Image (cartoon, grey):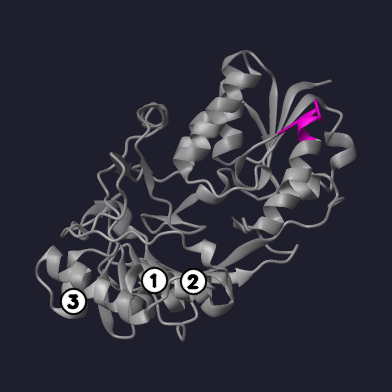
Amino acid sequence: MKYDYLIVGSGLFGAIFAYEANKRGKKCLVIDKRNHIAGNIYTEKIDGINVHKYGAHIFHTSNKEVWEYINQFAEFNRYTNSPVARYKNELYNMPFNMNTFNKLWGVITPEEARAKIEEEKKEAGITEPKNLEEQAISLVGKTIYEKLVKGYTEKQWGQRATELPSFIIKRLPVRFIYDNNYFNDIYQGIPIGGYTPIIEKMLEGIEVKLNCDFFENRNELENIAEKIVFTGQIDKYYNYQFGELEYRSLRFETEILEEENYQGNAVVNYTAYEVPYTRIIEHKHFEYGASLGKIAEGQALTKTIITREYPDAWTKEKEPYYPINNDKNNTLYEKYKELADKDSKVLFGGRLGQYKYFDMDKVIAEALKFVKAELK
């Protein structure tokens, strides 16, 4: 055996495990099927702007240990996520808060806003929601649902809200304060210089092979390390022997524009069903905020870069982004997990390996938990 660990995937989970194993004197090889490191948090500098290549990644956590851990590798700015929702030609603040309610109904006080929502819920008269539409209306009323939830959700899932199960929306956060900060977490920001340098620091001194697909080189790769840390699809690793797990995919269209400021915000959600994308990201706002004339690396930021994000049906040829954690898939995943628990050769981690949607801070927490258990 040439290595102690073969780490499949150079995203946050794989990179943290490699960094911690290397620190403890373990010999690691990290492989990635893409032509770059950092997985879905990869950022690429284009015309002085750090572009989030696989969708907006905003770091947020209330876990002090996680925050201090990631700050070893980067300095974070004070970016606050305050997305705007666009319904046709109307603009609303997210998450649903007093600014949103004032724009919808002209209400001023929290009491007036509560009364309006309760009135709409009562009018709907839904006691036992049978689908997502009924569930959402029973939580926030018809106006918020129709303008800000319905179209966006239908695009995201690729199905009409009346065909989606009610459990998808267990709650819809409603805030009766004038606060546009999307996250409640104590710590929040974007790493200055993007996410890729974080992974570069983690993988310093570790052997990395890019454009290397585990499944195309499986026979050779399975036998070069004592153990495998696998961050890809768990069902694919086991040759889909119990059947395929389901995912949603995404498609991105990125455009460089010859203007300084396209939409005035990092994230604008498009909630009308007729608009095929769910949001437009304007990358420069993650790091430059109000100072758009700022000189970056000797270049005035007179251009801007936007990305339209389209939800997409997943097939084996496409990238899986979101696990579909309904009862059917969760039951199927448990079969694979049972198999994995008996497998002393491989450890599964991350969104695809653990078939669970993780925010970045949860990925870090999970990776550190794995490190503690494995590298005693």
Q: Whole-percent x and y of residue 321?
A: 60, 57
| Badge nearest the viewer, 2 or 3 | 2
Residue at the disc numbered 1: 138
The Cα–Cα distance between marks 1 and 3, rounded to whole angstroms, is: 21 Å
Percent coordinates x, y for residue 278 in the rendering: 45, 72
Q: Amino acid at mark 3?
A: Lys
Tag 1–tag 2 contact (CB < 8 Å):
yes
For the residue labelled by badge 1, is the local secondary structure a helix, a strand or a loop? helix
Label whose residue precedes the other's in the sequence (2 or 3): 3
Mark seen at residue 82: none
The vertical placement of 24 against 156, above or below, is above
Instruction: Give neighbour class at mark 2: few <14, some 14-19, many 20+ (Cα, 10 Å).
Output: some
Q: Is residue 211 visible?
A: no
Confirm whether residue 190 shows in the render.
Answer: yes
Q: CA distance from mark 2 to mark 3?
A: 28 Å
Depth order, front residue of 86/190: 86
Label of residue 103 in the image: 3
Q: Please indicate whether residue 256 sits to the left or right of residue 96 in the image.
A: right
How far from the left and from the top, in percent, is residue 291? 18, 56
Residue occupying image coordinates x 17% and y 58%: 177
Q: CA distance from mark 1 to mark 2?
A: 7 Å
